[in-house]
Amino acid sequence: MIDKKLLDILVCPVTKSPLKYDKKNNELISKSAKLTYRIKDDIPILLPKNLEKFKVLEAEYHDHEAHHYGEINMINSFHVTHYHQKYLKIINELKDNSVILEVGSGDGNDAKNITKPKITIIQSDISFEMVKLAKNNKKNNAKTVYVVSDAEKIPCKDNSLDAIMIVGALHHLPSPINFFKEARRALSSNGILIVGFEPNSWPYFYIYPCIRFLKKLLMIEKYTSSKHSDVSIGDSETEGFTYSDFKLFLNESNLKLEKIQRIWFLFGFIHTLLSIVNSKLPQDKSIDLPIWLQKLIIYFDDFILTLPIIRNFCWHWTLVAKK
Ligand SMILES: C[S@@+](CC[C@H](N)C(=O)[O-])C[C@H]1O[C@@H](n2cnc3c(N)ncnc32)[C@H](O)[C@@H]1O
């Protein structure tokens, strides 16, 4: 059965025409475009039929790795959650009856911390297994519905959303600008766009090549490679984003920057090292710094990232923009 409010918002991802629920075949139909979309385990699959190879590979990788996701990325460590809480606060302060779309929502790690009850969250991801996992992980009391969709083809009506959130998923897109343009189309006037925890560019040019070189030089590749299957095509092809990239995306999509937060200086190095070590350890043996030390480093990082020049060397960005 498909949620009534969701059906009012959803459109065909290709033509943006309204969708009708066909109860007999349990599918959504776009009559004008003569297209049908399957519903599996109550999750509408709103992907274009001719999805690009890059996105098919992304979906397949995340379908396969869904259950290891949190383990690989240390998503529950204080130095990560501390920064997630900052943008989740914005969502938790939205007015009652707001509708929020999370794009590339993964296993639902962020949505479970949205505590405001009278809002609707649409959690979407290109990977069906990730969406299923998010559905099974639901812990909050906000009304949540689930959709499989592509970030570059948002299946929501024009001006229908109060907020859109994308966290750690923009760098998985072949054309991020398409997402920004789609976000502008689907946001209501004054709607909020949150782009959370996207990687900065410089480590891709200085740090990661050095790590690869050192592994080769020391012949320790086979000892340091992860126990999980490689990385997704998005992760292997991205070169992160500079501040200018974001300014360009916002300009081209006619969105206004409200706030930009720079994340991690020292902690970027520590996190990279911990991730390498933890990728070799069983989950129950993974290591982390004590919280007091994490707080101290975050305090230092937040200060140092206010300084000119050095602040360009943050490891991640979070930005808040408005339509
Ligand atoms: C690094 S994970 C981030 C998950 C989650 N937002 C978090 O912070 O824990 C990236 C997610 O983006 C999804 N993804 C990749 N390409 C996508 C696309 N074109 N449209 C929607 N989601 C996509 C992946 O399936 C994956 O779940």
Image (cartoon, rainbow, N blue to C red):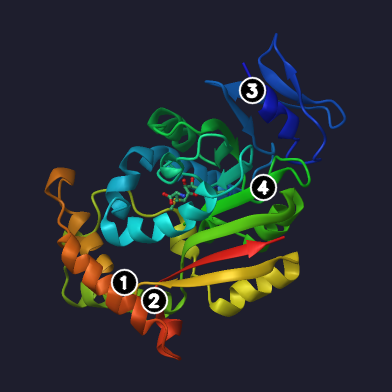
* Vertical arrangement, residue 296 with respect to residue 25, above or below: below
Q: Earlier in the sequence, mark 1 or mark 4?
A: 4
Quarter of the image for the N terminus: give it. Answer: top right
Q: Are marks 1 and 2 in contact (CB under 8 Å)?
A: yes
Residue 246's x, y, as percent? 60, 72
For the residues marked 3 and 1, what is the alpha-carbon distance in whole angstroms? 42 Å
Q: Earlier in the sequence, mark 2 or mark 3?
A: 3
Q: Which residue is mark 4?
A: 162
Q: Earlier in the sequence, mark 3 or mark 1?
A: 3
Residue 234's x, y, as percent? 49, 57
Q: Earlier in the sequence, mark 1 or mark 2?
A: 2
Pick the front one: 230 or 243 = 243
Residue 212 visible, this orientation:
no
Mark carried by residue 268: 1
Q: What residue lies at 41% left-to-right and 56% top-to-bottom? A: 84
Q: What residue lies at 64% left-to-right and 70% top-to-bottom? A: 257
* Vertical arrangement, residue 188 with respect to residue 306, above or below: above
For the residues marked 4 and 3, what is the alpha-carbon distance in whole angstroms? 18 Å
Disc nearest the viewer among 4 and 3? 4
**Secondary structure found at label 4:** strand
Taking the image as shown, residue 49 lies to the left or right of residue 72, namely right
Q: Which residue is mark 2?
A: 203
Residue 227's x, y, as percent? 23, 49
For the residues marked 4 and 2, what is the alpha-carbon distance in whole angstroms? 34 Å
Q: As shown in the figure, which amino acid type bears the numbered disc 3?
A: Asp
Q: As shown in the figure, which amino acid type bears the numbered disc 1?
A: Gly
* Vertical arrangement, residue 308 with respect to residue 188, above or below: below
Q: Which residue is mark 3?
A: 3
**Secondary structure found at label 3:** loop
Residue 179's x, y, as percent? 66, 56
Residue 140: quarter of image: top left
**Crowding near the residue tagged with mark 4, few <14, some 14–19, many ≥20 C-alpha atoms within 10 Å:** many
